[in-house]
Amino acid sequence: MSRFQLFVASAVTALVVVAGGVVAVRSSAAPRTLAFIAGGRVAGATQVAAAPARPPGPFAAPLSNPTSLESALAAIGYRLPAGAGVYAAKVTKEAGTLNYDDYQAGAGALGTGFWPASSIKLLAALGALEFVGKQGFTGAASVSFGGGAPRTIRSIYDAAIGVSSNADYDKLVEIAGVDWLNKEFLTPARGFPVTVIQRSYTVGGNLRSTPAITLSEGSRRVTVPARNGRVDTDCAQGQCSNLFEMSESVRRVVLHNELPAPERFQIAESDVAGLTAALLAAEGWFEPAVAKVLGTGARIYGKPGQVPGRDCLDVTLIEVRDGRRILLAATVPERTGGCPALVTLATNVLKFLTR
């Protein structure tokens, strides 16, 4: 089966602005990191339909038809919370080729009516690594911001993903630059027609104006001048994505060595390993569901996220001890259960997928 390929025609999102408000973003299952960002509230979960047109490039394969989980979940006595969305895929390998049986429910793989929160941080890391790669560097390079103390890029993405540091997420976006990240990396041709990353997760942060950065690795040294990026007005809430595109970031990292070359991110093998380790270390929401349904010993590569009062989500690739592999990404609004309901949702979806 071909990949569940997406190209978005349009989306209508209702936005209610909260004057002077702040949004607390908790980025993992443990309340270890909090950021505060000004913003508004998205009302409802909008289903986004795939357009007949296909983007150019390696992701122009025909759309597969994802199986709806609605009736299957109802048959085992479970009903999704209002506003929830699920994207899942069973990953198998035949004759050296990966195959995907795609499933969706509720707002589905393409719904955009939720806050992507910290689950979007992996794409920020990948964008930063591809950007420095074009300058001749890897994650082992040191970077300094505005003449500050240098740090390795790997230490920054380890913190942004493994313990979900919001300050380090901001630094990843500053490395890539908002314009390059959204206009060169997150494009339909690369398989990301919806995702927009432009919002700081730190108090008073402004990712559209970034300081000069200096990169050094071995004998090579490059200074990237300060940049002023533009606001993407098509993403009114500041950060936009869907479950499919965030799932793609996890899939293409963890399965990197099994993918055809056009599907791989253009990053060093050492950084593929580093990101994979960071995803495995991240403390997510699905662990209780995986343990209950699949037993102990499963490996969960994922990037959870939460905006208290708004949305709870997790984006994962699960490797079961018997070799089965499952992509599972889901979101539940806080108003209909949030993170506890997300665990129940994952439990029932995994029961169906592994029956």
Image (spheres, rainbow, N blue to C red):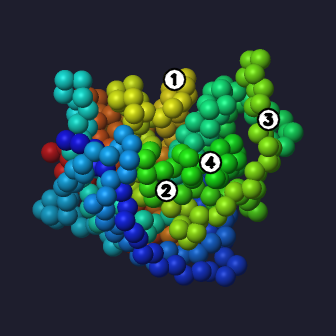
Quadrant in which residue 260 is drawn: top left
Towards the viewer: 251 or 2: 2
Q: Residue at x 51, y 41 (%)?
A: 282
Q: Position of residue 340 (x, y in %)?
A: 40, 61
Residue at the farthest left position: 75
- Distance between mark 1 and mark 3 Cα atoms: 24 Å
Query: For the residue marked with disc 4, what is the amino acid?
Result: Trp
Q: Vertically, is 224 above or below 112? A: above
Q: Position of residue 193 (x, y in %)?
A: 44, 55
Contact between labelled residues 2 and 4, with CB atoms less than 8 Å apart: no
- Distance between mark 4 and mark 2 Cα atoms: 13 Å
Q: Which residue is mark 4?
A: 180
Query: For the residue marked with disc 1, what is the amino acid?
Result: Glu
Q: Specify which label sits upstream in the sequence, 3 or 4.
A: 4
Question: In the image, 310: left or right of 252?
Answer: right
Q: Quadrant of the N terminus?
A: top left
Crowding at label 2, few (<14), some or many (≥20) Cα neighbours within 10 Å?
many
Crowding at label 4, few (<14), some or many (≥20) Cα neighbours within 10 Å?
some
Secondary structure state at the residue bearing disc 1: helix
Q: Residue at x 19, y 27 (%)?
A: 94
Towards the viewer: 283 or 267: 267
Query: For the residue marked with disc 2, what is the amino acid?
Result: Thr
Q: Which residue is mark 2?
A: 195
- Distance between mark 2 and mark 3 Cα atoms: 28 Å
